[in-house]
Image (cartoon, rainbow, N blue to C red):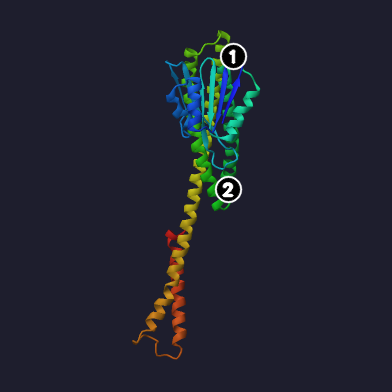
Amino acid sequence: MIKIHKLASYTWVEVISPTKEELRQVTNDYQTPVKFQSYMMDRHEQPRATFDELSGFGALVVRAIADQSSERMLTMPIFLGFSNTLLVTVCHDEKQGKMLSDGAQVEYPSVVEHIISILFDTISPYFDQLDVISHKAEELEGMHQRSISNHSLDELAALKTSLVYLRSATAGNLVALQELQPTIKTNVTLSSSLMQQSMAAISDLLIEYKQCQTMFDVVGDVVSETESAFGNILNNKLNQTMQFLTIWSLVLAIPPIVSGFYGMNVKLPLASADQAWFYTVVLTLLMVVVMIWYIKRDGRFRK
């Protein structure tokens, strides 16, 4: 889907979930570099900022959260192509498209101001998800004193997966913004006041992304420590279970040994007595008591 917004100082071409034919149409109609079509079409494109000197057209790719309601925080790329009089935005997710469409209600003085506004909109969901993940991590961290269920382990795995996507996306966006700053300063024509405001806004964005990255690192460390604690607790419980089974396997191995000997067709002590079965029971109990005493006396089976 392609929407054309004719604004006062530039034209905004809004593209949502494009086909190859639609991208060719945009490239032909607005003379954008053909090499940028792969950036527009690739749903796995990584953050980057570049500028084509020949056409005077720049490209910025950032990754934004696709669906905040999903358990796994997947990110999708948003392509921002720009020149002094043209802005081309391409996204592959309907919710991202709505976020960009909401920006059509505001008319910005320049393409750069519009791009900066989009970038501020993309970072807000990261902080929202950071709060959600932090809260879940605190809840899981508090389960050390309770039984660890399969559900809590699934939640922990989902948190780790989400953090991988989000940390990678914020780190990539940070690098792309660092590359964007000199690109705009060198290749985009703005008044001195607008250029100063734009550089200050990008600097603020860099600070926001650095804070976001740092906070994700902290939460990631908390989740990793929680996972390690869960592993230690589960290993300890497994050791206790194996110890319990080992003790009872030793104790319960005695009756078959005694009954096995007296079931053989050979002469054994007390085998010919009238109460031989009673003597075998007493012998078995005596050996069990001795085994239990030895196990308690031996330190290797202590918790």
For badge 2, the amino acid type reads Met
Q: Which residue is mark 1?
A: 9
Label 1 packing within 10 angstroms: few (<14), some (14-19), many (20+): some
Q: Residue at x 45, y 27 (%)?
A: 37
Q: Which mark is residue 143?
A: 2
Q: Residue 155, percent across and down?
A: 55, 46
Answer whether residue 173 is visible to the viewer in this image.
Answer: no
C-alpha span from label 2 to label 1: 57 Å
Q: Residue 211, percent across and down?
A: 54, 27
Q: Residue 167, percent across and down?
A: 50, 33
For badge 1, the amino acid type reads Ser
Viewer-side label of 2, 1: 1
The N terminus: image quadrant: top right
Q: Quadrant of residue 65?
A: top right
Q: Residue at x 37, y 81 (%)?
A: 261
Q: Residue at x 57, y 21 (%)?
A: 12
